[in-house]
Image (spheres, helix red, strand yellow):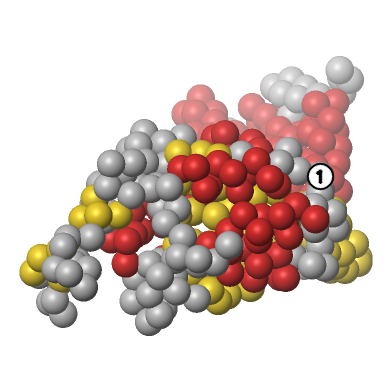
Amino acid sequence: MRFENPYLLFFLILIPATAAVYFYAFLLRKKALDKFGQGSLLDKLSTASVARKKAKAALTVLALFFVVIALARPQFGTKLVEIKRRGSDIVLAVDVSLSMLAEDVKPNRIERSKLLLSGLLQQLEGNKVGIVAFAGTAFWQCPLTLDITAANLFLQQMNTNLIPVQGTVIGDAIRLAVKGLSKTSEKSKSIVILTDGEDHKSDPLGAAEEAAKAKIKIFAVGIGSKNGEPIPVKDESAKFIGYKKDKNGNIVMSKMDIGVLEKIAEITGGQYFDASSAQTDIGGLVNAIRGLEKSKLSANLNRQYEEKYQYFLFLALLLLIIEYFIPETKGKKR
């Protein structure tokens, strides 16, 4: 036997406490009678029955015991129950290129992205989630999983040092995600791609068309400044030493390419969301994902304990009914 709420067994302390109160009350009554004369003689003359009062007290204490046991929800005996899960398969494609270090969104683009996606993951419980990281190439950071906590741990480990090959290949990230979703039912899969939109010749629109053919919606989330922001460069001790420069010595300005992201979303029937503001609300994105059709994700046989609290509750109720109908006076029925 096991208890679902074992901490409630602490209230069993009420049993001896209640019994002690009754005992003390009977002791005071006996002392009071002894002051007036012989206690046994007074008991015979009284219409009240001490034995019946003691019986009623015992029944009350026993009923209280069974109530506490019932509240702790005793369980014994098991049965196999099939638990079916339905949901969607979602791939989060996250840009980890150096341009994500730009600080036009505080503290910077990559950290703001992780914060936003972490909040999104909390809303995706019950769905399968995978994570693709991309910069100059793309790879699976976390395979599709129902374990949202594990997915969030992989997300928090992402940084701009994750991929040594620099660049931004949005198209490659989309193709990799599409391949990972190939076994998922149509209309039950989507890609959330979060980037500043700067693509380096990976044909993202062509990749979006491939996703559309596979019935995959892409929700594009743009983060960054439209006017451009320099990319800070730091040494090994995280001390700022300047800004990234091109071959000609000019400071590189990273601009968000909204046009590409909007087009990707449009081709696949998804939506574009702007995450550049500190007050960005992910509610619209969550609702869009929840609007996808659900498919069967898994079916597992779980061993489930059977609840038995009702038996103890019945015993407590029965004892209280018996207690109620026992009269306190001699030779009289209620």
> Quarter-wise, where is residue 213 in the image?
bottom right
Residue 219 pos. (x, y %): 60, 46
Residue most toward the front? 248
Residue at the image position 82 percent from the left and 36 percent from the top: 317
Element assignment for label 1: loop
Q: Position of residue 328 (x, y in %)?
A: 76, 25
Q: Residues within 10 Å of mark 1 (few under 14, many from 20)?
A: some
The image quadrant of residue 151 is: bottom right
Q: Position of residue 75 (x, y in %)?
A: 79, 60
Classify residue 125 as left or right of residue 75. left
Amino acid residing under circle 1: Glu
Which residue has dot 1 on it? 293
Residue 50 versus residue 153: which sits nearer the camera?
153
Is 115 placed above or below 27 here? below
> Residue drawn 49% across and 54% down?
194
Q: Residue at x 86, y 37 (%)?
A: 318
Instruction: Tell me the quarter of the image containing the N terminus.
Output: bottom right
Q: Can residue 229 be seen at all in this image of the molecule?
A: yes
